Image: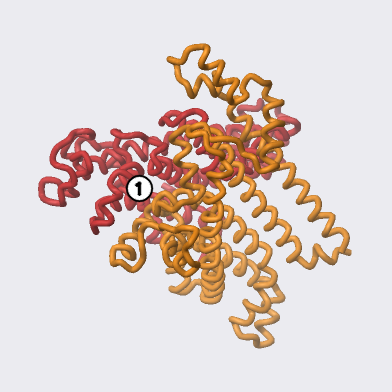
Chain colours: A orange, B red
Amino acid sequence: MGSVWKMVAHRLGLGLLTMFVISILIFGAIELLPGDLAEEILGQSATPETVAAFRKEIGLDKPPVTRYVEWLGNVVQGNLGRSLANGREISELIGSRLPNTLFLALYATVLAVPIALTLGILAALYRNTLFDRLINITTLTSISFPEFFLAYLLIFFLAQTGLFPSMSNIGPKMGLSGKIYNTFLPALTLTFVVTAHMMRMTRAAIVNLLASPYIEMAKLKGVSPLWVIVRHALPNAFAPIINVVALNLAYLITGVVVVEVVFVYPGLGQLMVDSVSKRDITVVQAVSLIFACAYILLNLTADVLSTLSNPRLIHKR
Amino acid sequence: MKIIKSLRTAPPTAWFGFVVVTIYLIVAIFAPLIAPYGEREIVGDEYVAWDSQFIFGTDALGRDMFTRLVFGARNTVGIAFVTTVLAFVVGAVFGLLAAVVGGWLDQLLSRTVDVLMAIPSLIFKLLLLTIFGTSVVNMVLIIALIDSTRVYRLARSVAMNIVVMDYIEAARLRGERLPRLIIREILPNAMAPLVAEFGLRFCFVFLAISALSFLGLGIQPPTADWGSMVRENASLISFGDITPLLPAAAIALLTVAVNFIVDWMLHRASGLKD
């Protein structure tokens, strides 16, 4: 039992280290600018005095290491600083949007995972039939579609007829059922995007195992094909499946950016895109940090879960 | 000859892919001959419906949709291609070098790549675009840099398996220098997976550029580009007009086609027979 927890602790430690390095990267990226942030934002026409004053205001007169330590200390305490564009507290800007983005990602997950697993198992069961080939072509196609194409296709076919709203207005006072109805199209778009990949990996993981001798044994003793897959192959395919599910959830995090813009959904992605075009660097840094941390956390969870799903690692001799 | 022979056995999906890619290439190369109007020319009223004069109608400024679609093939695909080549050259050169030289160079490059890959790529691209400002050149360089990390990973792992082979040992003992070792000995055996990766990478880069342009952060108007064309005309969709879907469909069709080709190539390279 001890060794597996040591492994988990090791992974967690690595994850923390990665987050630390990433915070340096996200903070330090500004230092790559040929001039500095103040010159870049104020433009060429600014007088030296304004530049100096602005530098002082955003703390650019201190050395980078001091600034980084101060910034990290504040971030850990939940104080993300102020927006360069409108001077508002970033934590206030993010506060209302983060739950919205998480809701959308969760919604898509709840839709996508069962669909992907079922289709994956069915494709493995009926492999090399017309059904399998059809699913293969459809998923390959939907992987290659840009997200906004899928989104507009759904708007055209489902919102046009008035079935679902094409703009996801959601407010804090709205009930859960209203939220689910209003965000159905963005969630469905994301579902399409991630299901394809998850399903293909599920199929591949299962088909890989079907050549093993123990599967042949199960077949020979007369177990039905569905039961062979569900009872015998699936448990051993869990590790890769968990991995690909987590990877796709991590993908959802970046996928939401485009989808949120299409459906005018008040989430983090929309905020990020707006801030990029305004070059509001402090906001972009904060949002990138949140996205990057969520990404690392998901990968970490996948790592730990797939380790725990492997009995050979848990009961090591 | 070998290619033609294997093409004969290619599945219909791969054939479809080749035909589509060829059509796109022809359209991109002969864009000015095919398009009825100039790329930025305002030829009529705003949002004219589809008719015999303007096959797909006009856009928000009264430019011919069909013309802009044709020029989009040149601009969007061209920029995506250049970016992919850049990402590929950087990633492959460093990946092969890391595998052949090994030691501290490998450690340094690999750890740097690990860090760069730990941030979701779209988020990282947006962060860098904010810092350096949004322009086509910046976008190309940023996407090339970030995608080269993925190419590096693949090139290194492929080359790693080749470097340990006996004939490389022999080549080293014969005194072959590094460039020759990489180009003449390793590259030919690493070609198949690298070519497939090139196709896949092109799809990713192409989709990334389209997404950024769609968000208004990539290729800027008045250049005809499929991503920004979707954005500019998106409001038409709520009136039941499918015109804005055309550029999006053009993007989708090309990625599907390339994916079909890559799928077939990977299938062939892995030696699987069905």
Q: Is residue B5 visible?
A: no
Q: Is residue B228 left or right of residue A197?
A: left
Image mark 1: chain: B
Residue at 40% x, 43% y is B215
Residue A269 coordinates in the image, percent (x, y): 49, 47
Q: Secondary structure at mark 1?
A: helix
Residue A87 coordinates in the image, percent (x, y): 52, 34
Q: Is residue A264 left or right of residue B167?
A: left
* Residue closest to the far front: A173
Q: Of residues B13 and B162, which is closer to you in this image? A: B13
Residue at 22% x, 33% y is B40
Q: Is residue B234 visible?
A: yes
Residue at 14% x, 46% y is B54
Q: Is residue B150 left or right of residue A24?
A: left
Residue A51 coordinates in the image, percent (x, y): 53, 17
Q: Of residues B110 and B46, which is closer to you in this image? A: B46
* Residue closest to the far top: A48
Crowding at dot 1, Cα within 10 Å, few <14 / some 14-19 / many 20+, comes out as some
Q: Is residue A72 left or right of residue B253?
A: right
Q: Is residue B191 above or below residue A216?
A: above
On the image, numbered disc 1 is attached to which residue? B21
Q: Of residues B138 and B237, which is closer to you in this image? A: B237
Residue A315 coordinates in the image, percent (x, y): 84, 66
Q: Of residues B247 and A284, which is closer to you in this image? A: A284
Disc 1 residue type? Val
